[in-house]
Image (tube, rainbow, N blue to C red):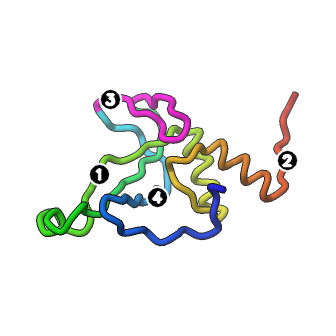
C-alpha cells in the first residue's frame, strides 16, 4: 500500500532525500516546462502546480563537513489535477511519497473507505 495514516520518520541513510509538503498551489515559474511527478504530463510555464522542496542527506562525512546536514536538491512538481488529489488526501490525514501516482492513491483511498465516486454517464 502506498497510503499511510502517519508519516514515517526520515531515514537518514547517506543520499536519502526528504521533501517539504506544499500547502497550496503556485504558478510554475521555471525557464522550461516541468513534468508532473505523478502523471508525467508536462506542466506549462505559468500553470497552477504544487512544488515540493527537497533536501538530501550527505553521502559521507566529507560532504557533511563541506555542505552541512541537509543539502538542497531539485524540487519536484505536480500538475493541478494531481496536486488537488495530493492536497485533499493529505488534508484527510494520509501520508505518501510524492513520487506515487496520485490516481492510484485516490483509488486506494476509495477502496479503504468504501467510497464510490458518483460518475455521470
At 59% across and 43% down in the image, what residue appears?
101
Residue 30's image quarter? top left
Q: CA distance from mark 1 to mark 3?
A: 17 Å
* Gap between marks 4 and 1 measured at Cα: 15 Å
SS at circle 2: loop
Name the N-terminal-most of marks 2 and 3.
3
Residue topped by disc 1: 73
Q: Which residue is mark 2?
A: 116
Q: Earlier in the sequence, mark 3 or mark 4?
A: 4
Asked if residue 30 lies left or right of residue 103, the reply is: left
Looking at the rendered structure, the number of numbered marks drawn on it comes to 4
**Circle 1 SS class:** strand
Label 4–label 1 contact, CB within 8 A: no
Q: Position of residue 81 (x, y in %)?
A: 59, 39
**Cβ atoms at labels 4 and 2 below 8 Å apart:** no
Q: Which residue occupies the foreground of this view, 24 or 33?
A: 33
Left or right of 80: which side holds 32? left
**Numbered circle sitting on residue 32:** 3
Q: Is residue 99 left or right of residue 15?
A: right
Amino acid at each position: 500500500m502506498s497510503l499511510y495514516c502517519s508519516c514515517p520518520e526520515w531515514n537518514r541513510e547517506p543520499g536519502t532525500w526528504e521533501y517539504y509538503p506544499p500547502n497550496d498551489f503556485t504558478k510554475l515559474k521555471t525557464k522550461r516546462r516541468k513534468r508532473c511527478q505523478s502523471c508525467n504530463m508536462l506542466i506549462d510555464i505559468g500553470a497552477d502546480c504544487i512544488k515540493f522542496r527537497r533536501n538530501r542527506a550527505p553521502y559521507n562525512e566529507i560532504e557533511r563537513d563541506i555542505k552541512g546536514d541537509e543539502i538542497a536538491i531539485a524540487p519536484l512538481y505536480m500538475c493541478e489535477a494531481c496536486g488537488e488529489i495530493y492536497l485533499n488526501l493529505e488534508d484527510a490525514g494520509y501520508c505518501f511519497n510524492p513520487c506515487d501516482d496520485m490516481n492510484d492513491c485516490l483509488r486506494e483511498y476509495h477502496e479503504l473507505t468504501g467510497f464510490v465516486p458518483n460518475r455521470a454517464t
